[in-house]
Amino acid sequence: MAEGGFAATERVFTAHMRDPAQAPAPAGVEDRRLEIYRGLLYRNVEGFMANAFPVLRSLYDEARWHALVRDYFAQHRARTPLFPKMPQEFLHYLEARGEVPGDPPFLRELAEYEWLEAEILFNPRELDEVAVDDEPDLEHGRPCANPVMQARCYRFPVHRIGPDCQPHTPPPAPTYLVVFRHRDDRVGFMELNAVSARLLQLVVENTARSGRALLEQVAAELAHPEPAAVVRHGLDILADFHARDIVLGTLAVGA
């Protein structure tokens, strides 16, 4: 077969593999053989997606779930061939697809939250490479955030969603969550409030200031009548962050 003819056949074949209901099979190929490839490719993708998004999968019946995965398989053009990146490709698909009648209102937020766990787990960064003081001074030293961490603010309480908890409207207050990797490689999750989320944001962005200085900024932003109380309570939050490996330790201010 000429090179051009082979390329054309290859395009027909791949289009049929993606969407056998709409794209005709290549001529001269026995359907029994095509079915082997159709089933293998789809089962690989569907199984990977079900494992990557177990909560999302639990909210869909068989027909709706397979319709969603088949639409992703047929319509989305991935930016990478790597299977570990497929959950992120699914997020790109959902964003491009937009909201469809029948979608849960929290679909994209829940999918991103579930994706974060894999993103954190497979991050190649080694936490032991982060140089911090063995005995951190969270008040006078510069708190150092865990670099393998993602903080998010969601409209829906995605960490509580499941078959028995599927809110139709978002609650009045947003949900603040942080997903991170412990030193022993476990993935951790923590719910924050608006104040602790702001403190964590300042820690992540900080390059030169002490923990006390960050807490004094929080107190000023809150216009709190007792800044010293904010600092005391905030030091407890920083200690909790450190115990959980959200903050790995401290460095000298200016270091």
Image (cartoon, helix red, strand yellow):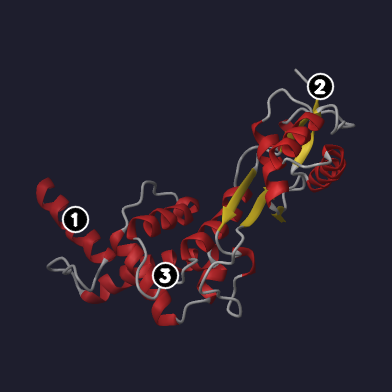
Residue that badge 1 annotates: 11
The x, y position of residue 134, in whole percent, is 87, 31
Q: Is residue 161 above or below residue 12?
A: below
Residue that badge 3 annotates: 43
The residue closer to the viewer here, 9 or 227, is 227
The x, y position of residue 180, in whole percent, is 68, 48
Which residue is rendered at x = 27% and y = 72% of the image? 33
The residue under label 2 is which amino acid type? Ala
Where disc 1 sits, the SS reads helix
- The quadrant of the image that shows the C terminus is top right
* 29 relative to 98 in the view: left or right: left
- Which tag is nearer the camera, tag 2 or tag 1? 2
The residue closer to the viewer here, 94 or 65, is 94
The x, y position of residue 41, in whole percent, is 37, 65
Q: Which mark is residue 252?
A: 2
Q: Is residue 189 above or below residue 28?
A: above
Residue that protrudes farthest toward the right in the picture? 135
Q: Which mark is residue 209?
A: none
* 82 relative to 211 in the view: left or right: left
**Mark 2 vs mark 1, CA separation in Å:** 60 Å
First reached walking from the N terminus: tag 3 or tag 2: 3
The residue under label 3 is which amino acid type? Arg
First reached walking from the N terminus: tag 2 or tag 1: 1
**Mark 3 vs mark 2, CA separation in Å:** 53 Å
